[in-house]
Amino acid sequence: MHPLPNLAELRLAETIRHLGAAGFESALHDWLRRCLAPDNILILAYRDALAPQILFTQSDQPQVFSQLKAHYLAGAYLLDPFHDMHLNRVTAGAYRLRDVAPDAFHRSRYFIDYYQQTTLVDEITFVAYPHPDISLNICLGRDATSGQPFGPRDLETAQRLAPVVAALGESHWAHLADPGGAPADVTAALIATLGDRHGIRLSRRQAEVALLILRGHSTQSIGLRLNLSPQTIKVFRKQLYAKCGLTSQAELFALMVPLLKATQRGAAP
């Protein structure tokens, strides 16, 4: 029999051969590129008390990851929908950004000032758990290179591949160890840092509302998250802006993001 040109299967075989060895990340990238044709790939590990650990990146568009260390790892990741998924320990699988992002995400300052600058137009992320307190994110992006979002067939393929990708990732990165320590309380740290640096004392609820605004949640979405009425959220938002002397979300972003960076213990090595 003549062998069929199953190039995706051949690349999967190469990925399996490199498990636990040098070259695994590149082999995984080649396989996923054959299956889903992403323009870039980012593999990182989220941990509760530390900044994410970057394990692998590949992109033909330099701008995609140009602010990864200086901005994202420094604290902006705390506003990312995928970090929120880590905190909530979602089920391992494939997730599309537009399906998991808050309802006002594309109007948030985080999206405008950071995410939009990456030129990303779409993203599918495989979530796996090599350790109970560590979530592995294998992020496939479409950016200005192609300018094309993932299609319905791509999403179906990603869902089919998800168990295999998770098994490979959990096996290869099983050595990742939990650094220990209690999970970071971002809300409490923000309250303390804002008080120390600016003398502004927020209640915990006001700080929670601030973080949800920055993450791209609308008033209705914040109410659902906090189990409060939209009118009550409007009151907290008004109190927050008055205490901080703000009039817009852009001003809130400018005030809070440097504080979020200051609350972090630093990026994992």
Image (cartoon, helix red, strand yellow):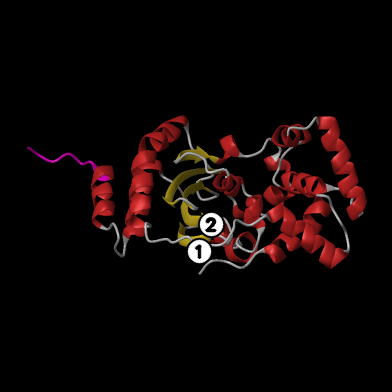
- The amino acid sitting under disc 2 is Arg
The stretch in magenta equals 1-7
**Mark 2, other Cα within 10 Å: few <14 / some 14–19 / many ≥20:** many
Is residue 34 visible in the rendered image? The answer is no
Q: In this rendering, would 96 be left or right of 163? A: right
- Marks 1 and 2 sit apart, C-alpha to C-alpha, by 8 Å
Q: Which residue is mark 2?
A: 47
Q: Residue at x 57, y 59 (%)?
A: 63
The picture places residue 262, in percent across and down from the top left corner, at 71, 66
User: Mark 1: which secondary structure?
Assistant: loop
Q: Residue at x 62, y 59 (%)?
A: 72
Residue 207 vs 23, above or below: the answer is: above
**Mark 1, other Cα within 10 Å: few <14 / some 14–19 / many ≥20:** few
Q: Earlier in the sequence, mark 1 or mark 2?
A: 2
Residue 111 vs 96, above or below: the answer is: below
- The amino acid sitting under disc 1 is Pro
The picture places residue 49, in percent across and down from the top left corner, at 59, 59
Q: Which residue is mark 1?
A: 179
User: Mark 2: which secondary structure?
Assistant: strand
